[in-house]
Image (cartoon, grey):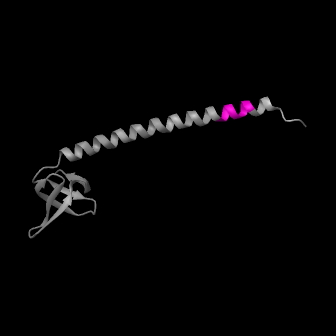
């Protein structure tokens, strides 16, 4: 039984085209998700203001007392103020 090289070449081309199409679809889906995440992060960072209630990455709730560049002072109870990175804020609570 002889191996037909033309069949092997066309099979490789077909597989390469299918892999290429799958890669293009995955890249398109990934870029769309990254755009949504970037917009959500921009909206979240825009909502950070003094007096806003927030929840940050550790699941702790607090109220923003002071904002200085990337460091935010958060009051988690009446006598406790901690400093966190503005990028650790997970959600701004709107009542």
- Judge whether 73 appears above or below 92 on screen: below
Q: Residue at x 56, y 37 (%)?
A: 22
- Judge whether 94 appears above or below 24 on screen: below
Q: Of helix, strand and loop, which mostly describes the magenta segment?
A: helix
Q: Position of residue 94 (x, y in %)?
A: 17, 50
**Is 25 displayed left or right of 13 in the figure?**
left
Q: Is residue 10 magenta?
A: yes
Q: Residue at x 35, y 38 (%)?
A: 35
**Is 63 displayed left or right of 41 in the figure?**
left
Q: Is residue 26 magenta?
A: no
Q: Residue at x 26, y 56 (%)?
A: 88
Q: Which quadrant holds the N terminus?
A: top right
Residues drawn in magenta = 9-15
Q: Residue at x 62, y 32 (%)?
A: 17
Q: Position of residue 36 (x, y in %)?
A: 34, 40
Q: Position of residue 77 (x, y in %)?
A: 12, 68
Q: Nearer the viewer, residue 1 or 95?
A: 1
């Amino acid at each position: 039984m002889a191996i037909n090289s033309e069949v092997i070449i066309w099979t490789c081309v077909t597989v390469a085209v299918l892999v290429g199409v799958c890669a293009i679809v995955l890249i398109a889906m990934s870029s769309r998700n990254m755009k949504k995440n970037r917009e959500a992060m921009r909206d979240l960072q825009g909502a950070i203001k003094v007096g806003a209630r927030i929840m940050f990455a550790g699941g702790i709730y607090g109220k923003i007392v002071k904002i200085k560049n990337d460091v935010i002072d958060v009051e988690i109870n009446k006598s406790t103020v901690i400093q966190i990175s503005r990028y650790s804020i997970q959600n701004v609570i709107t009542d």
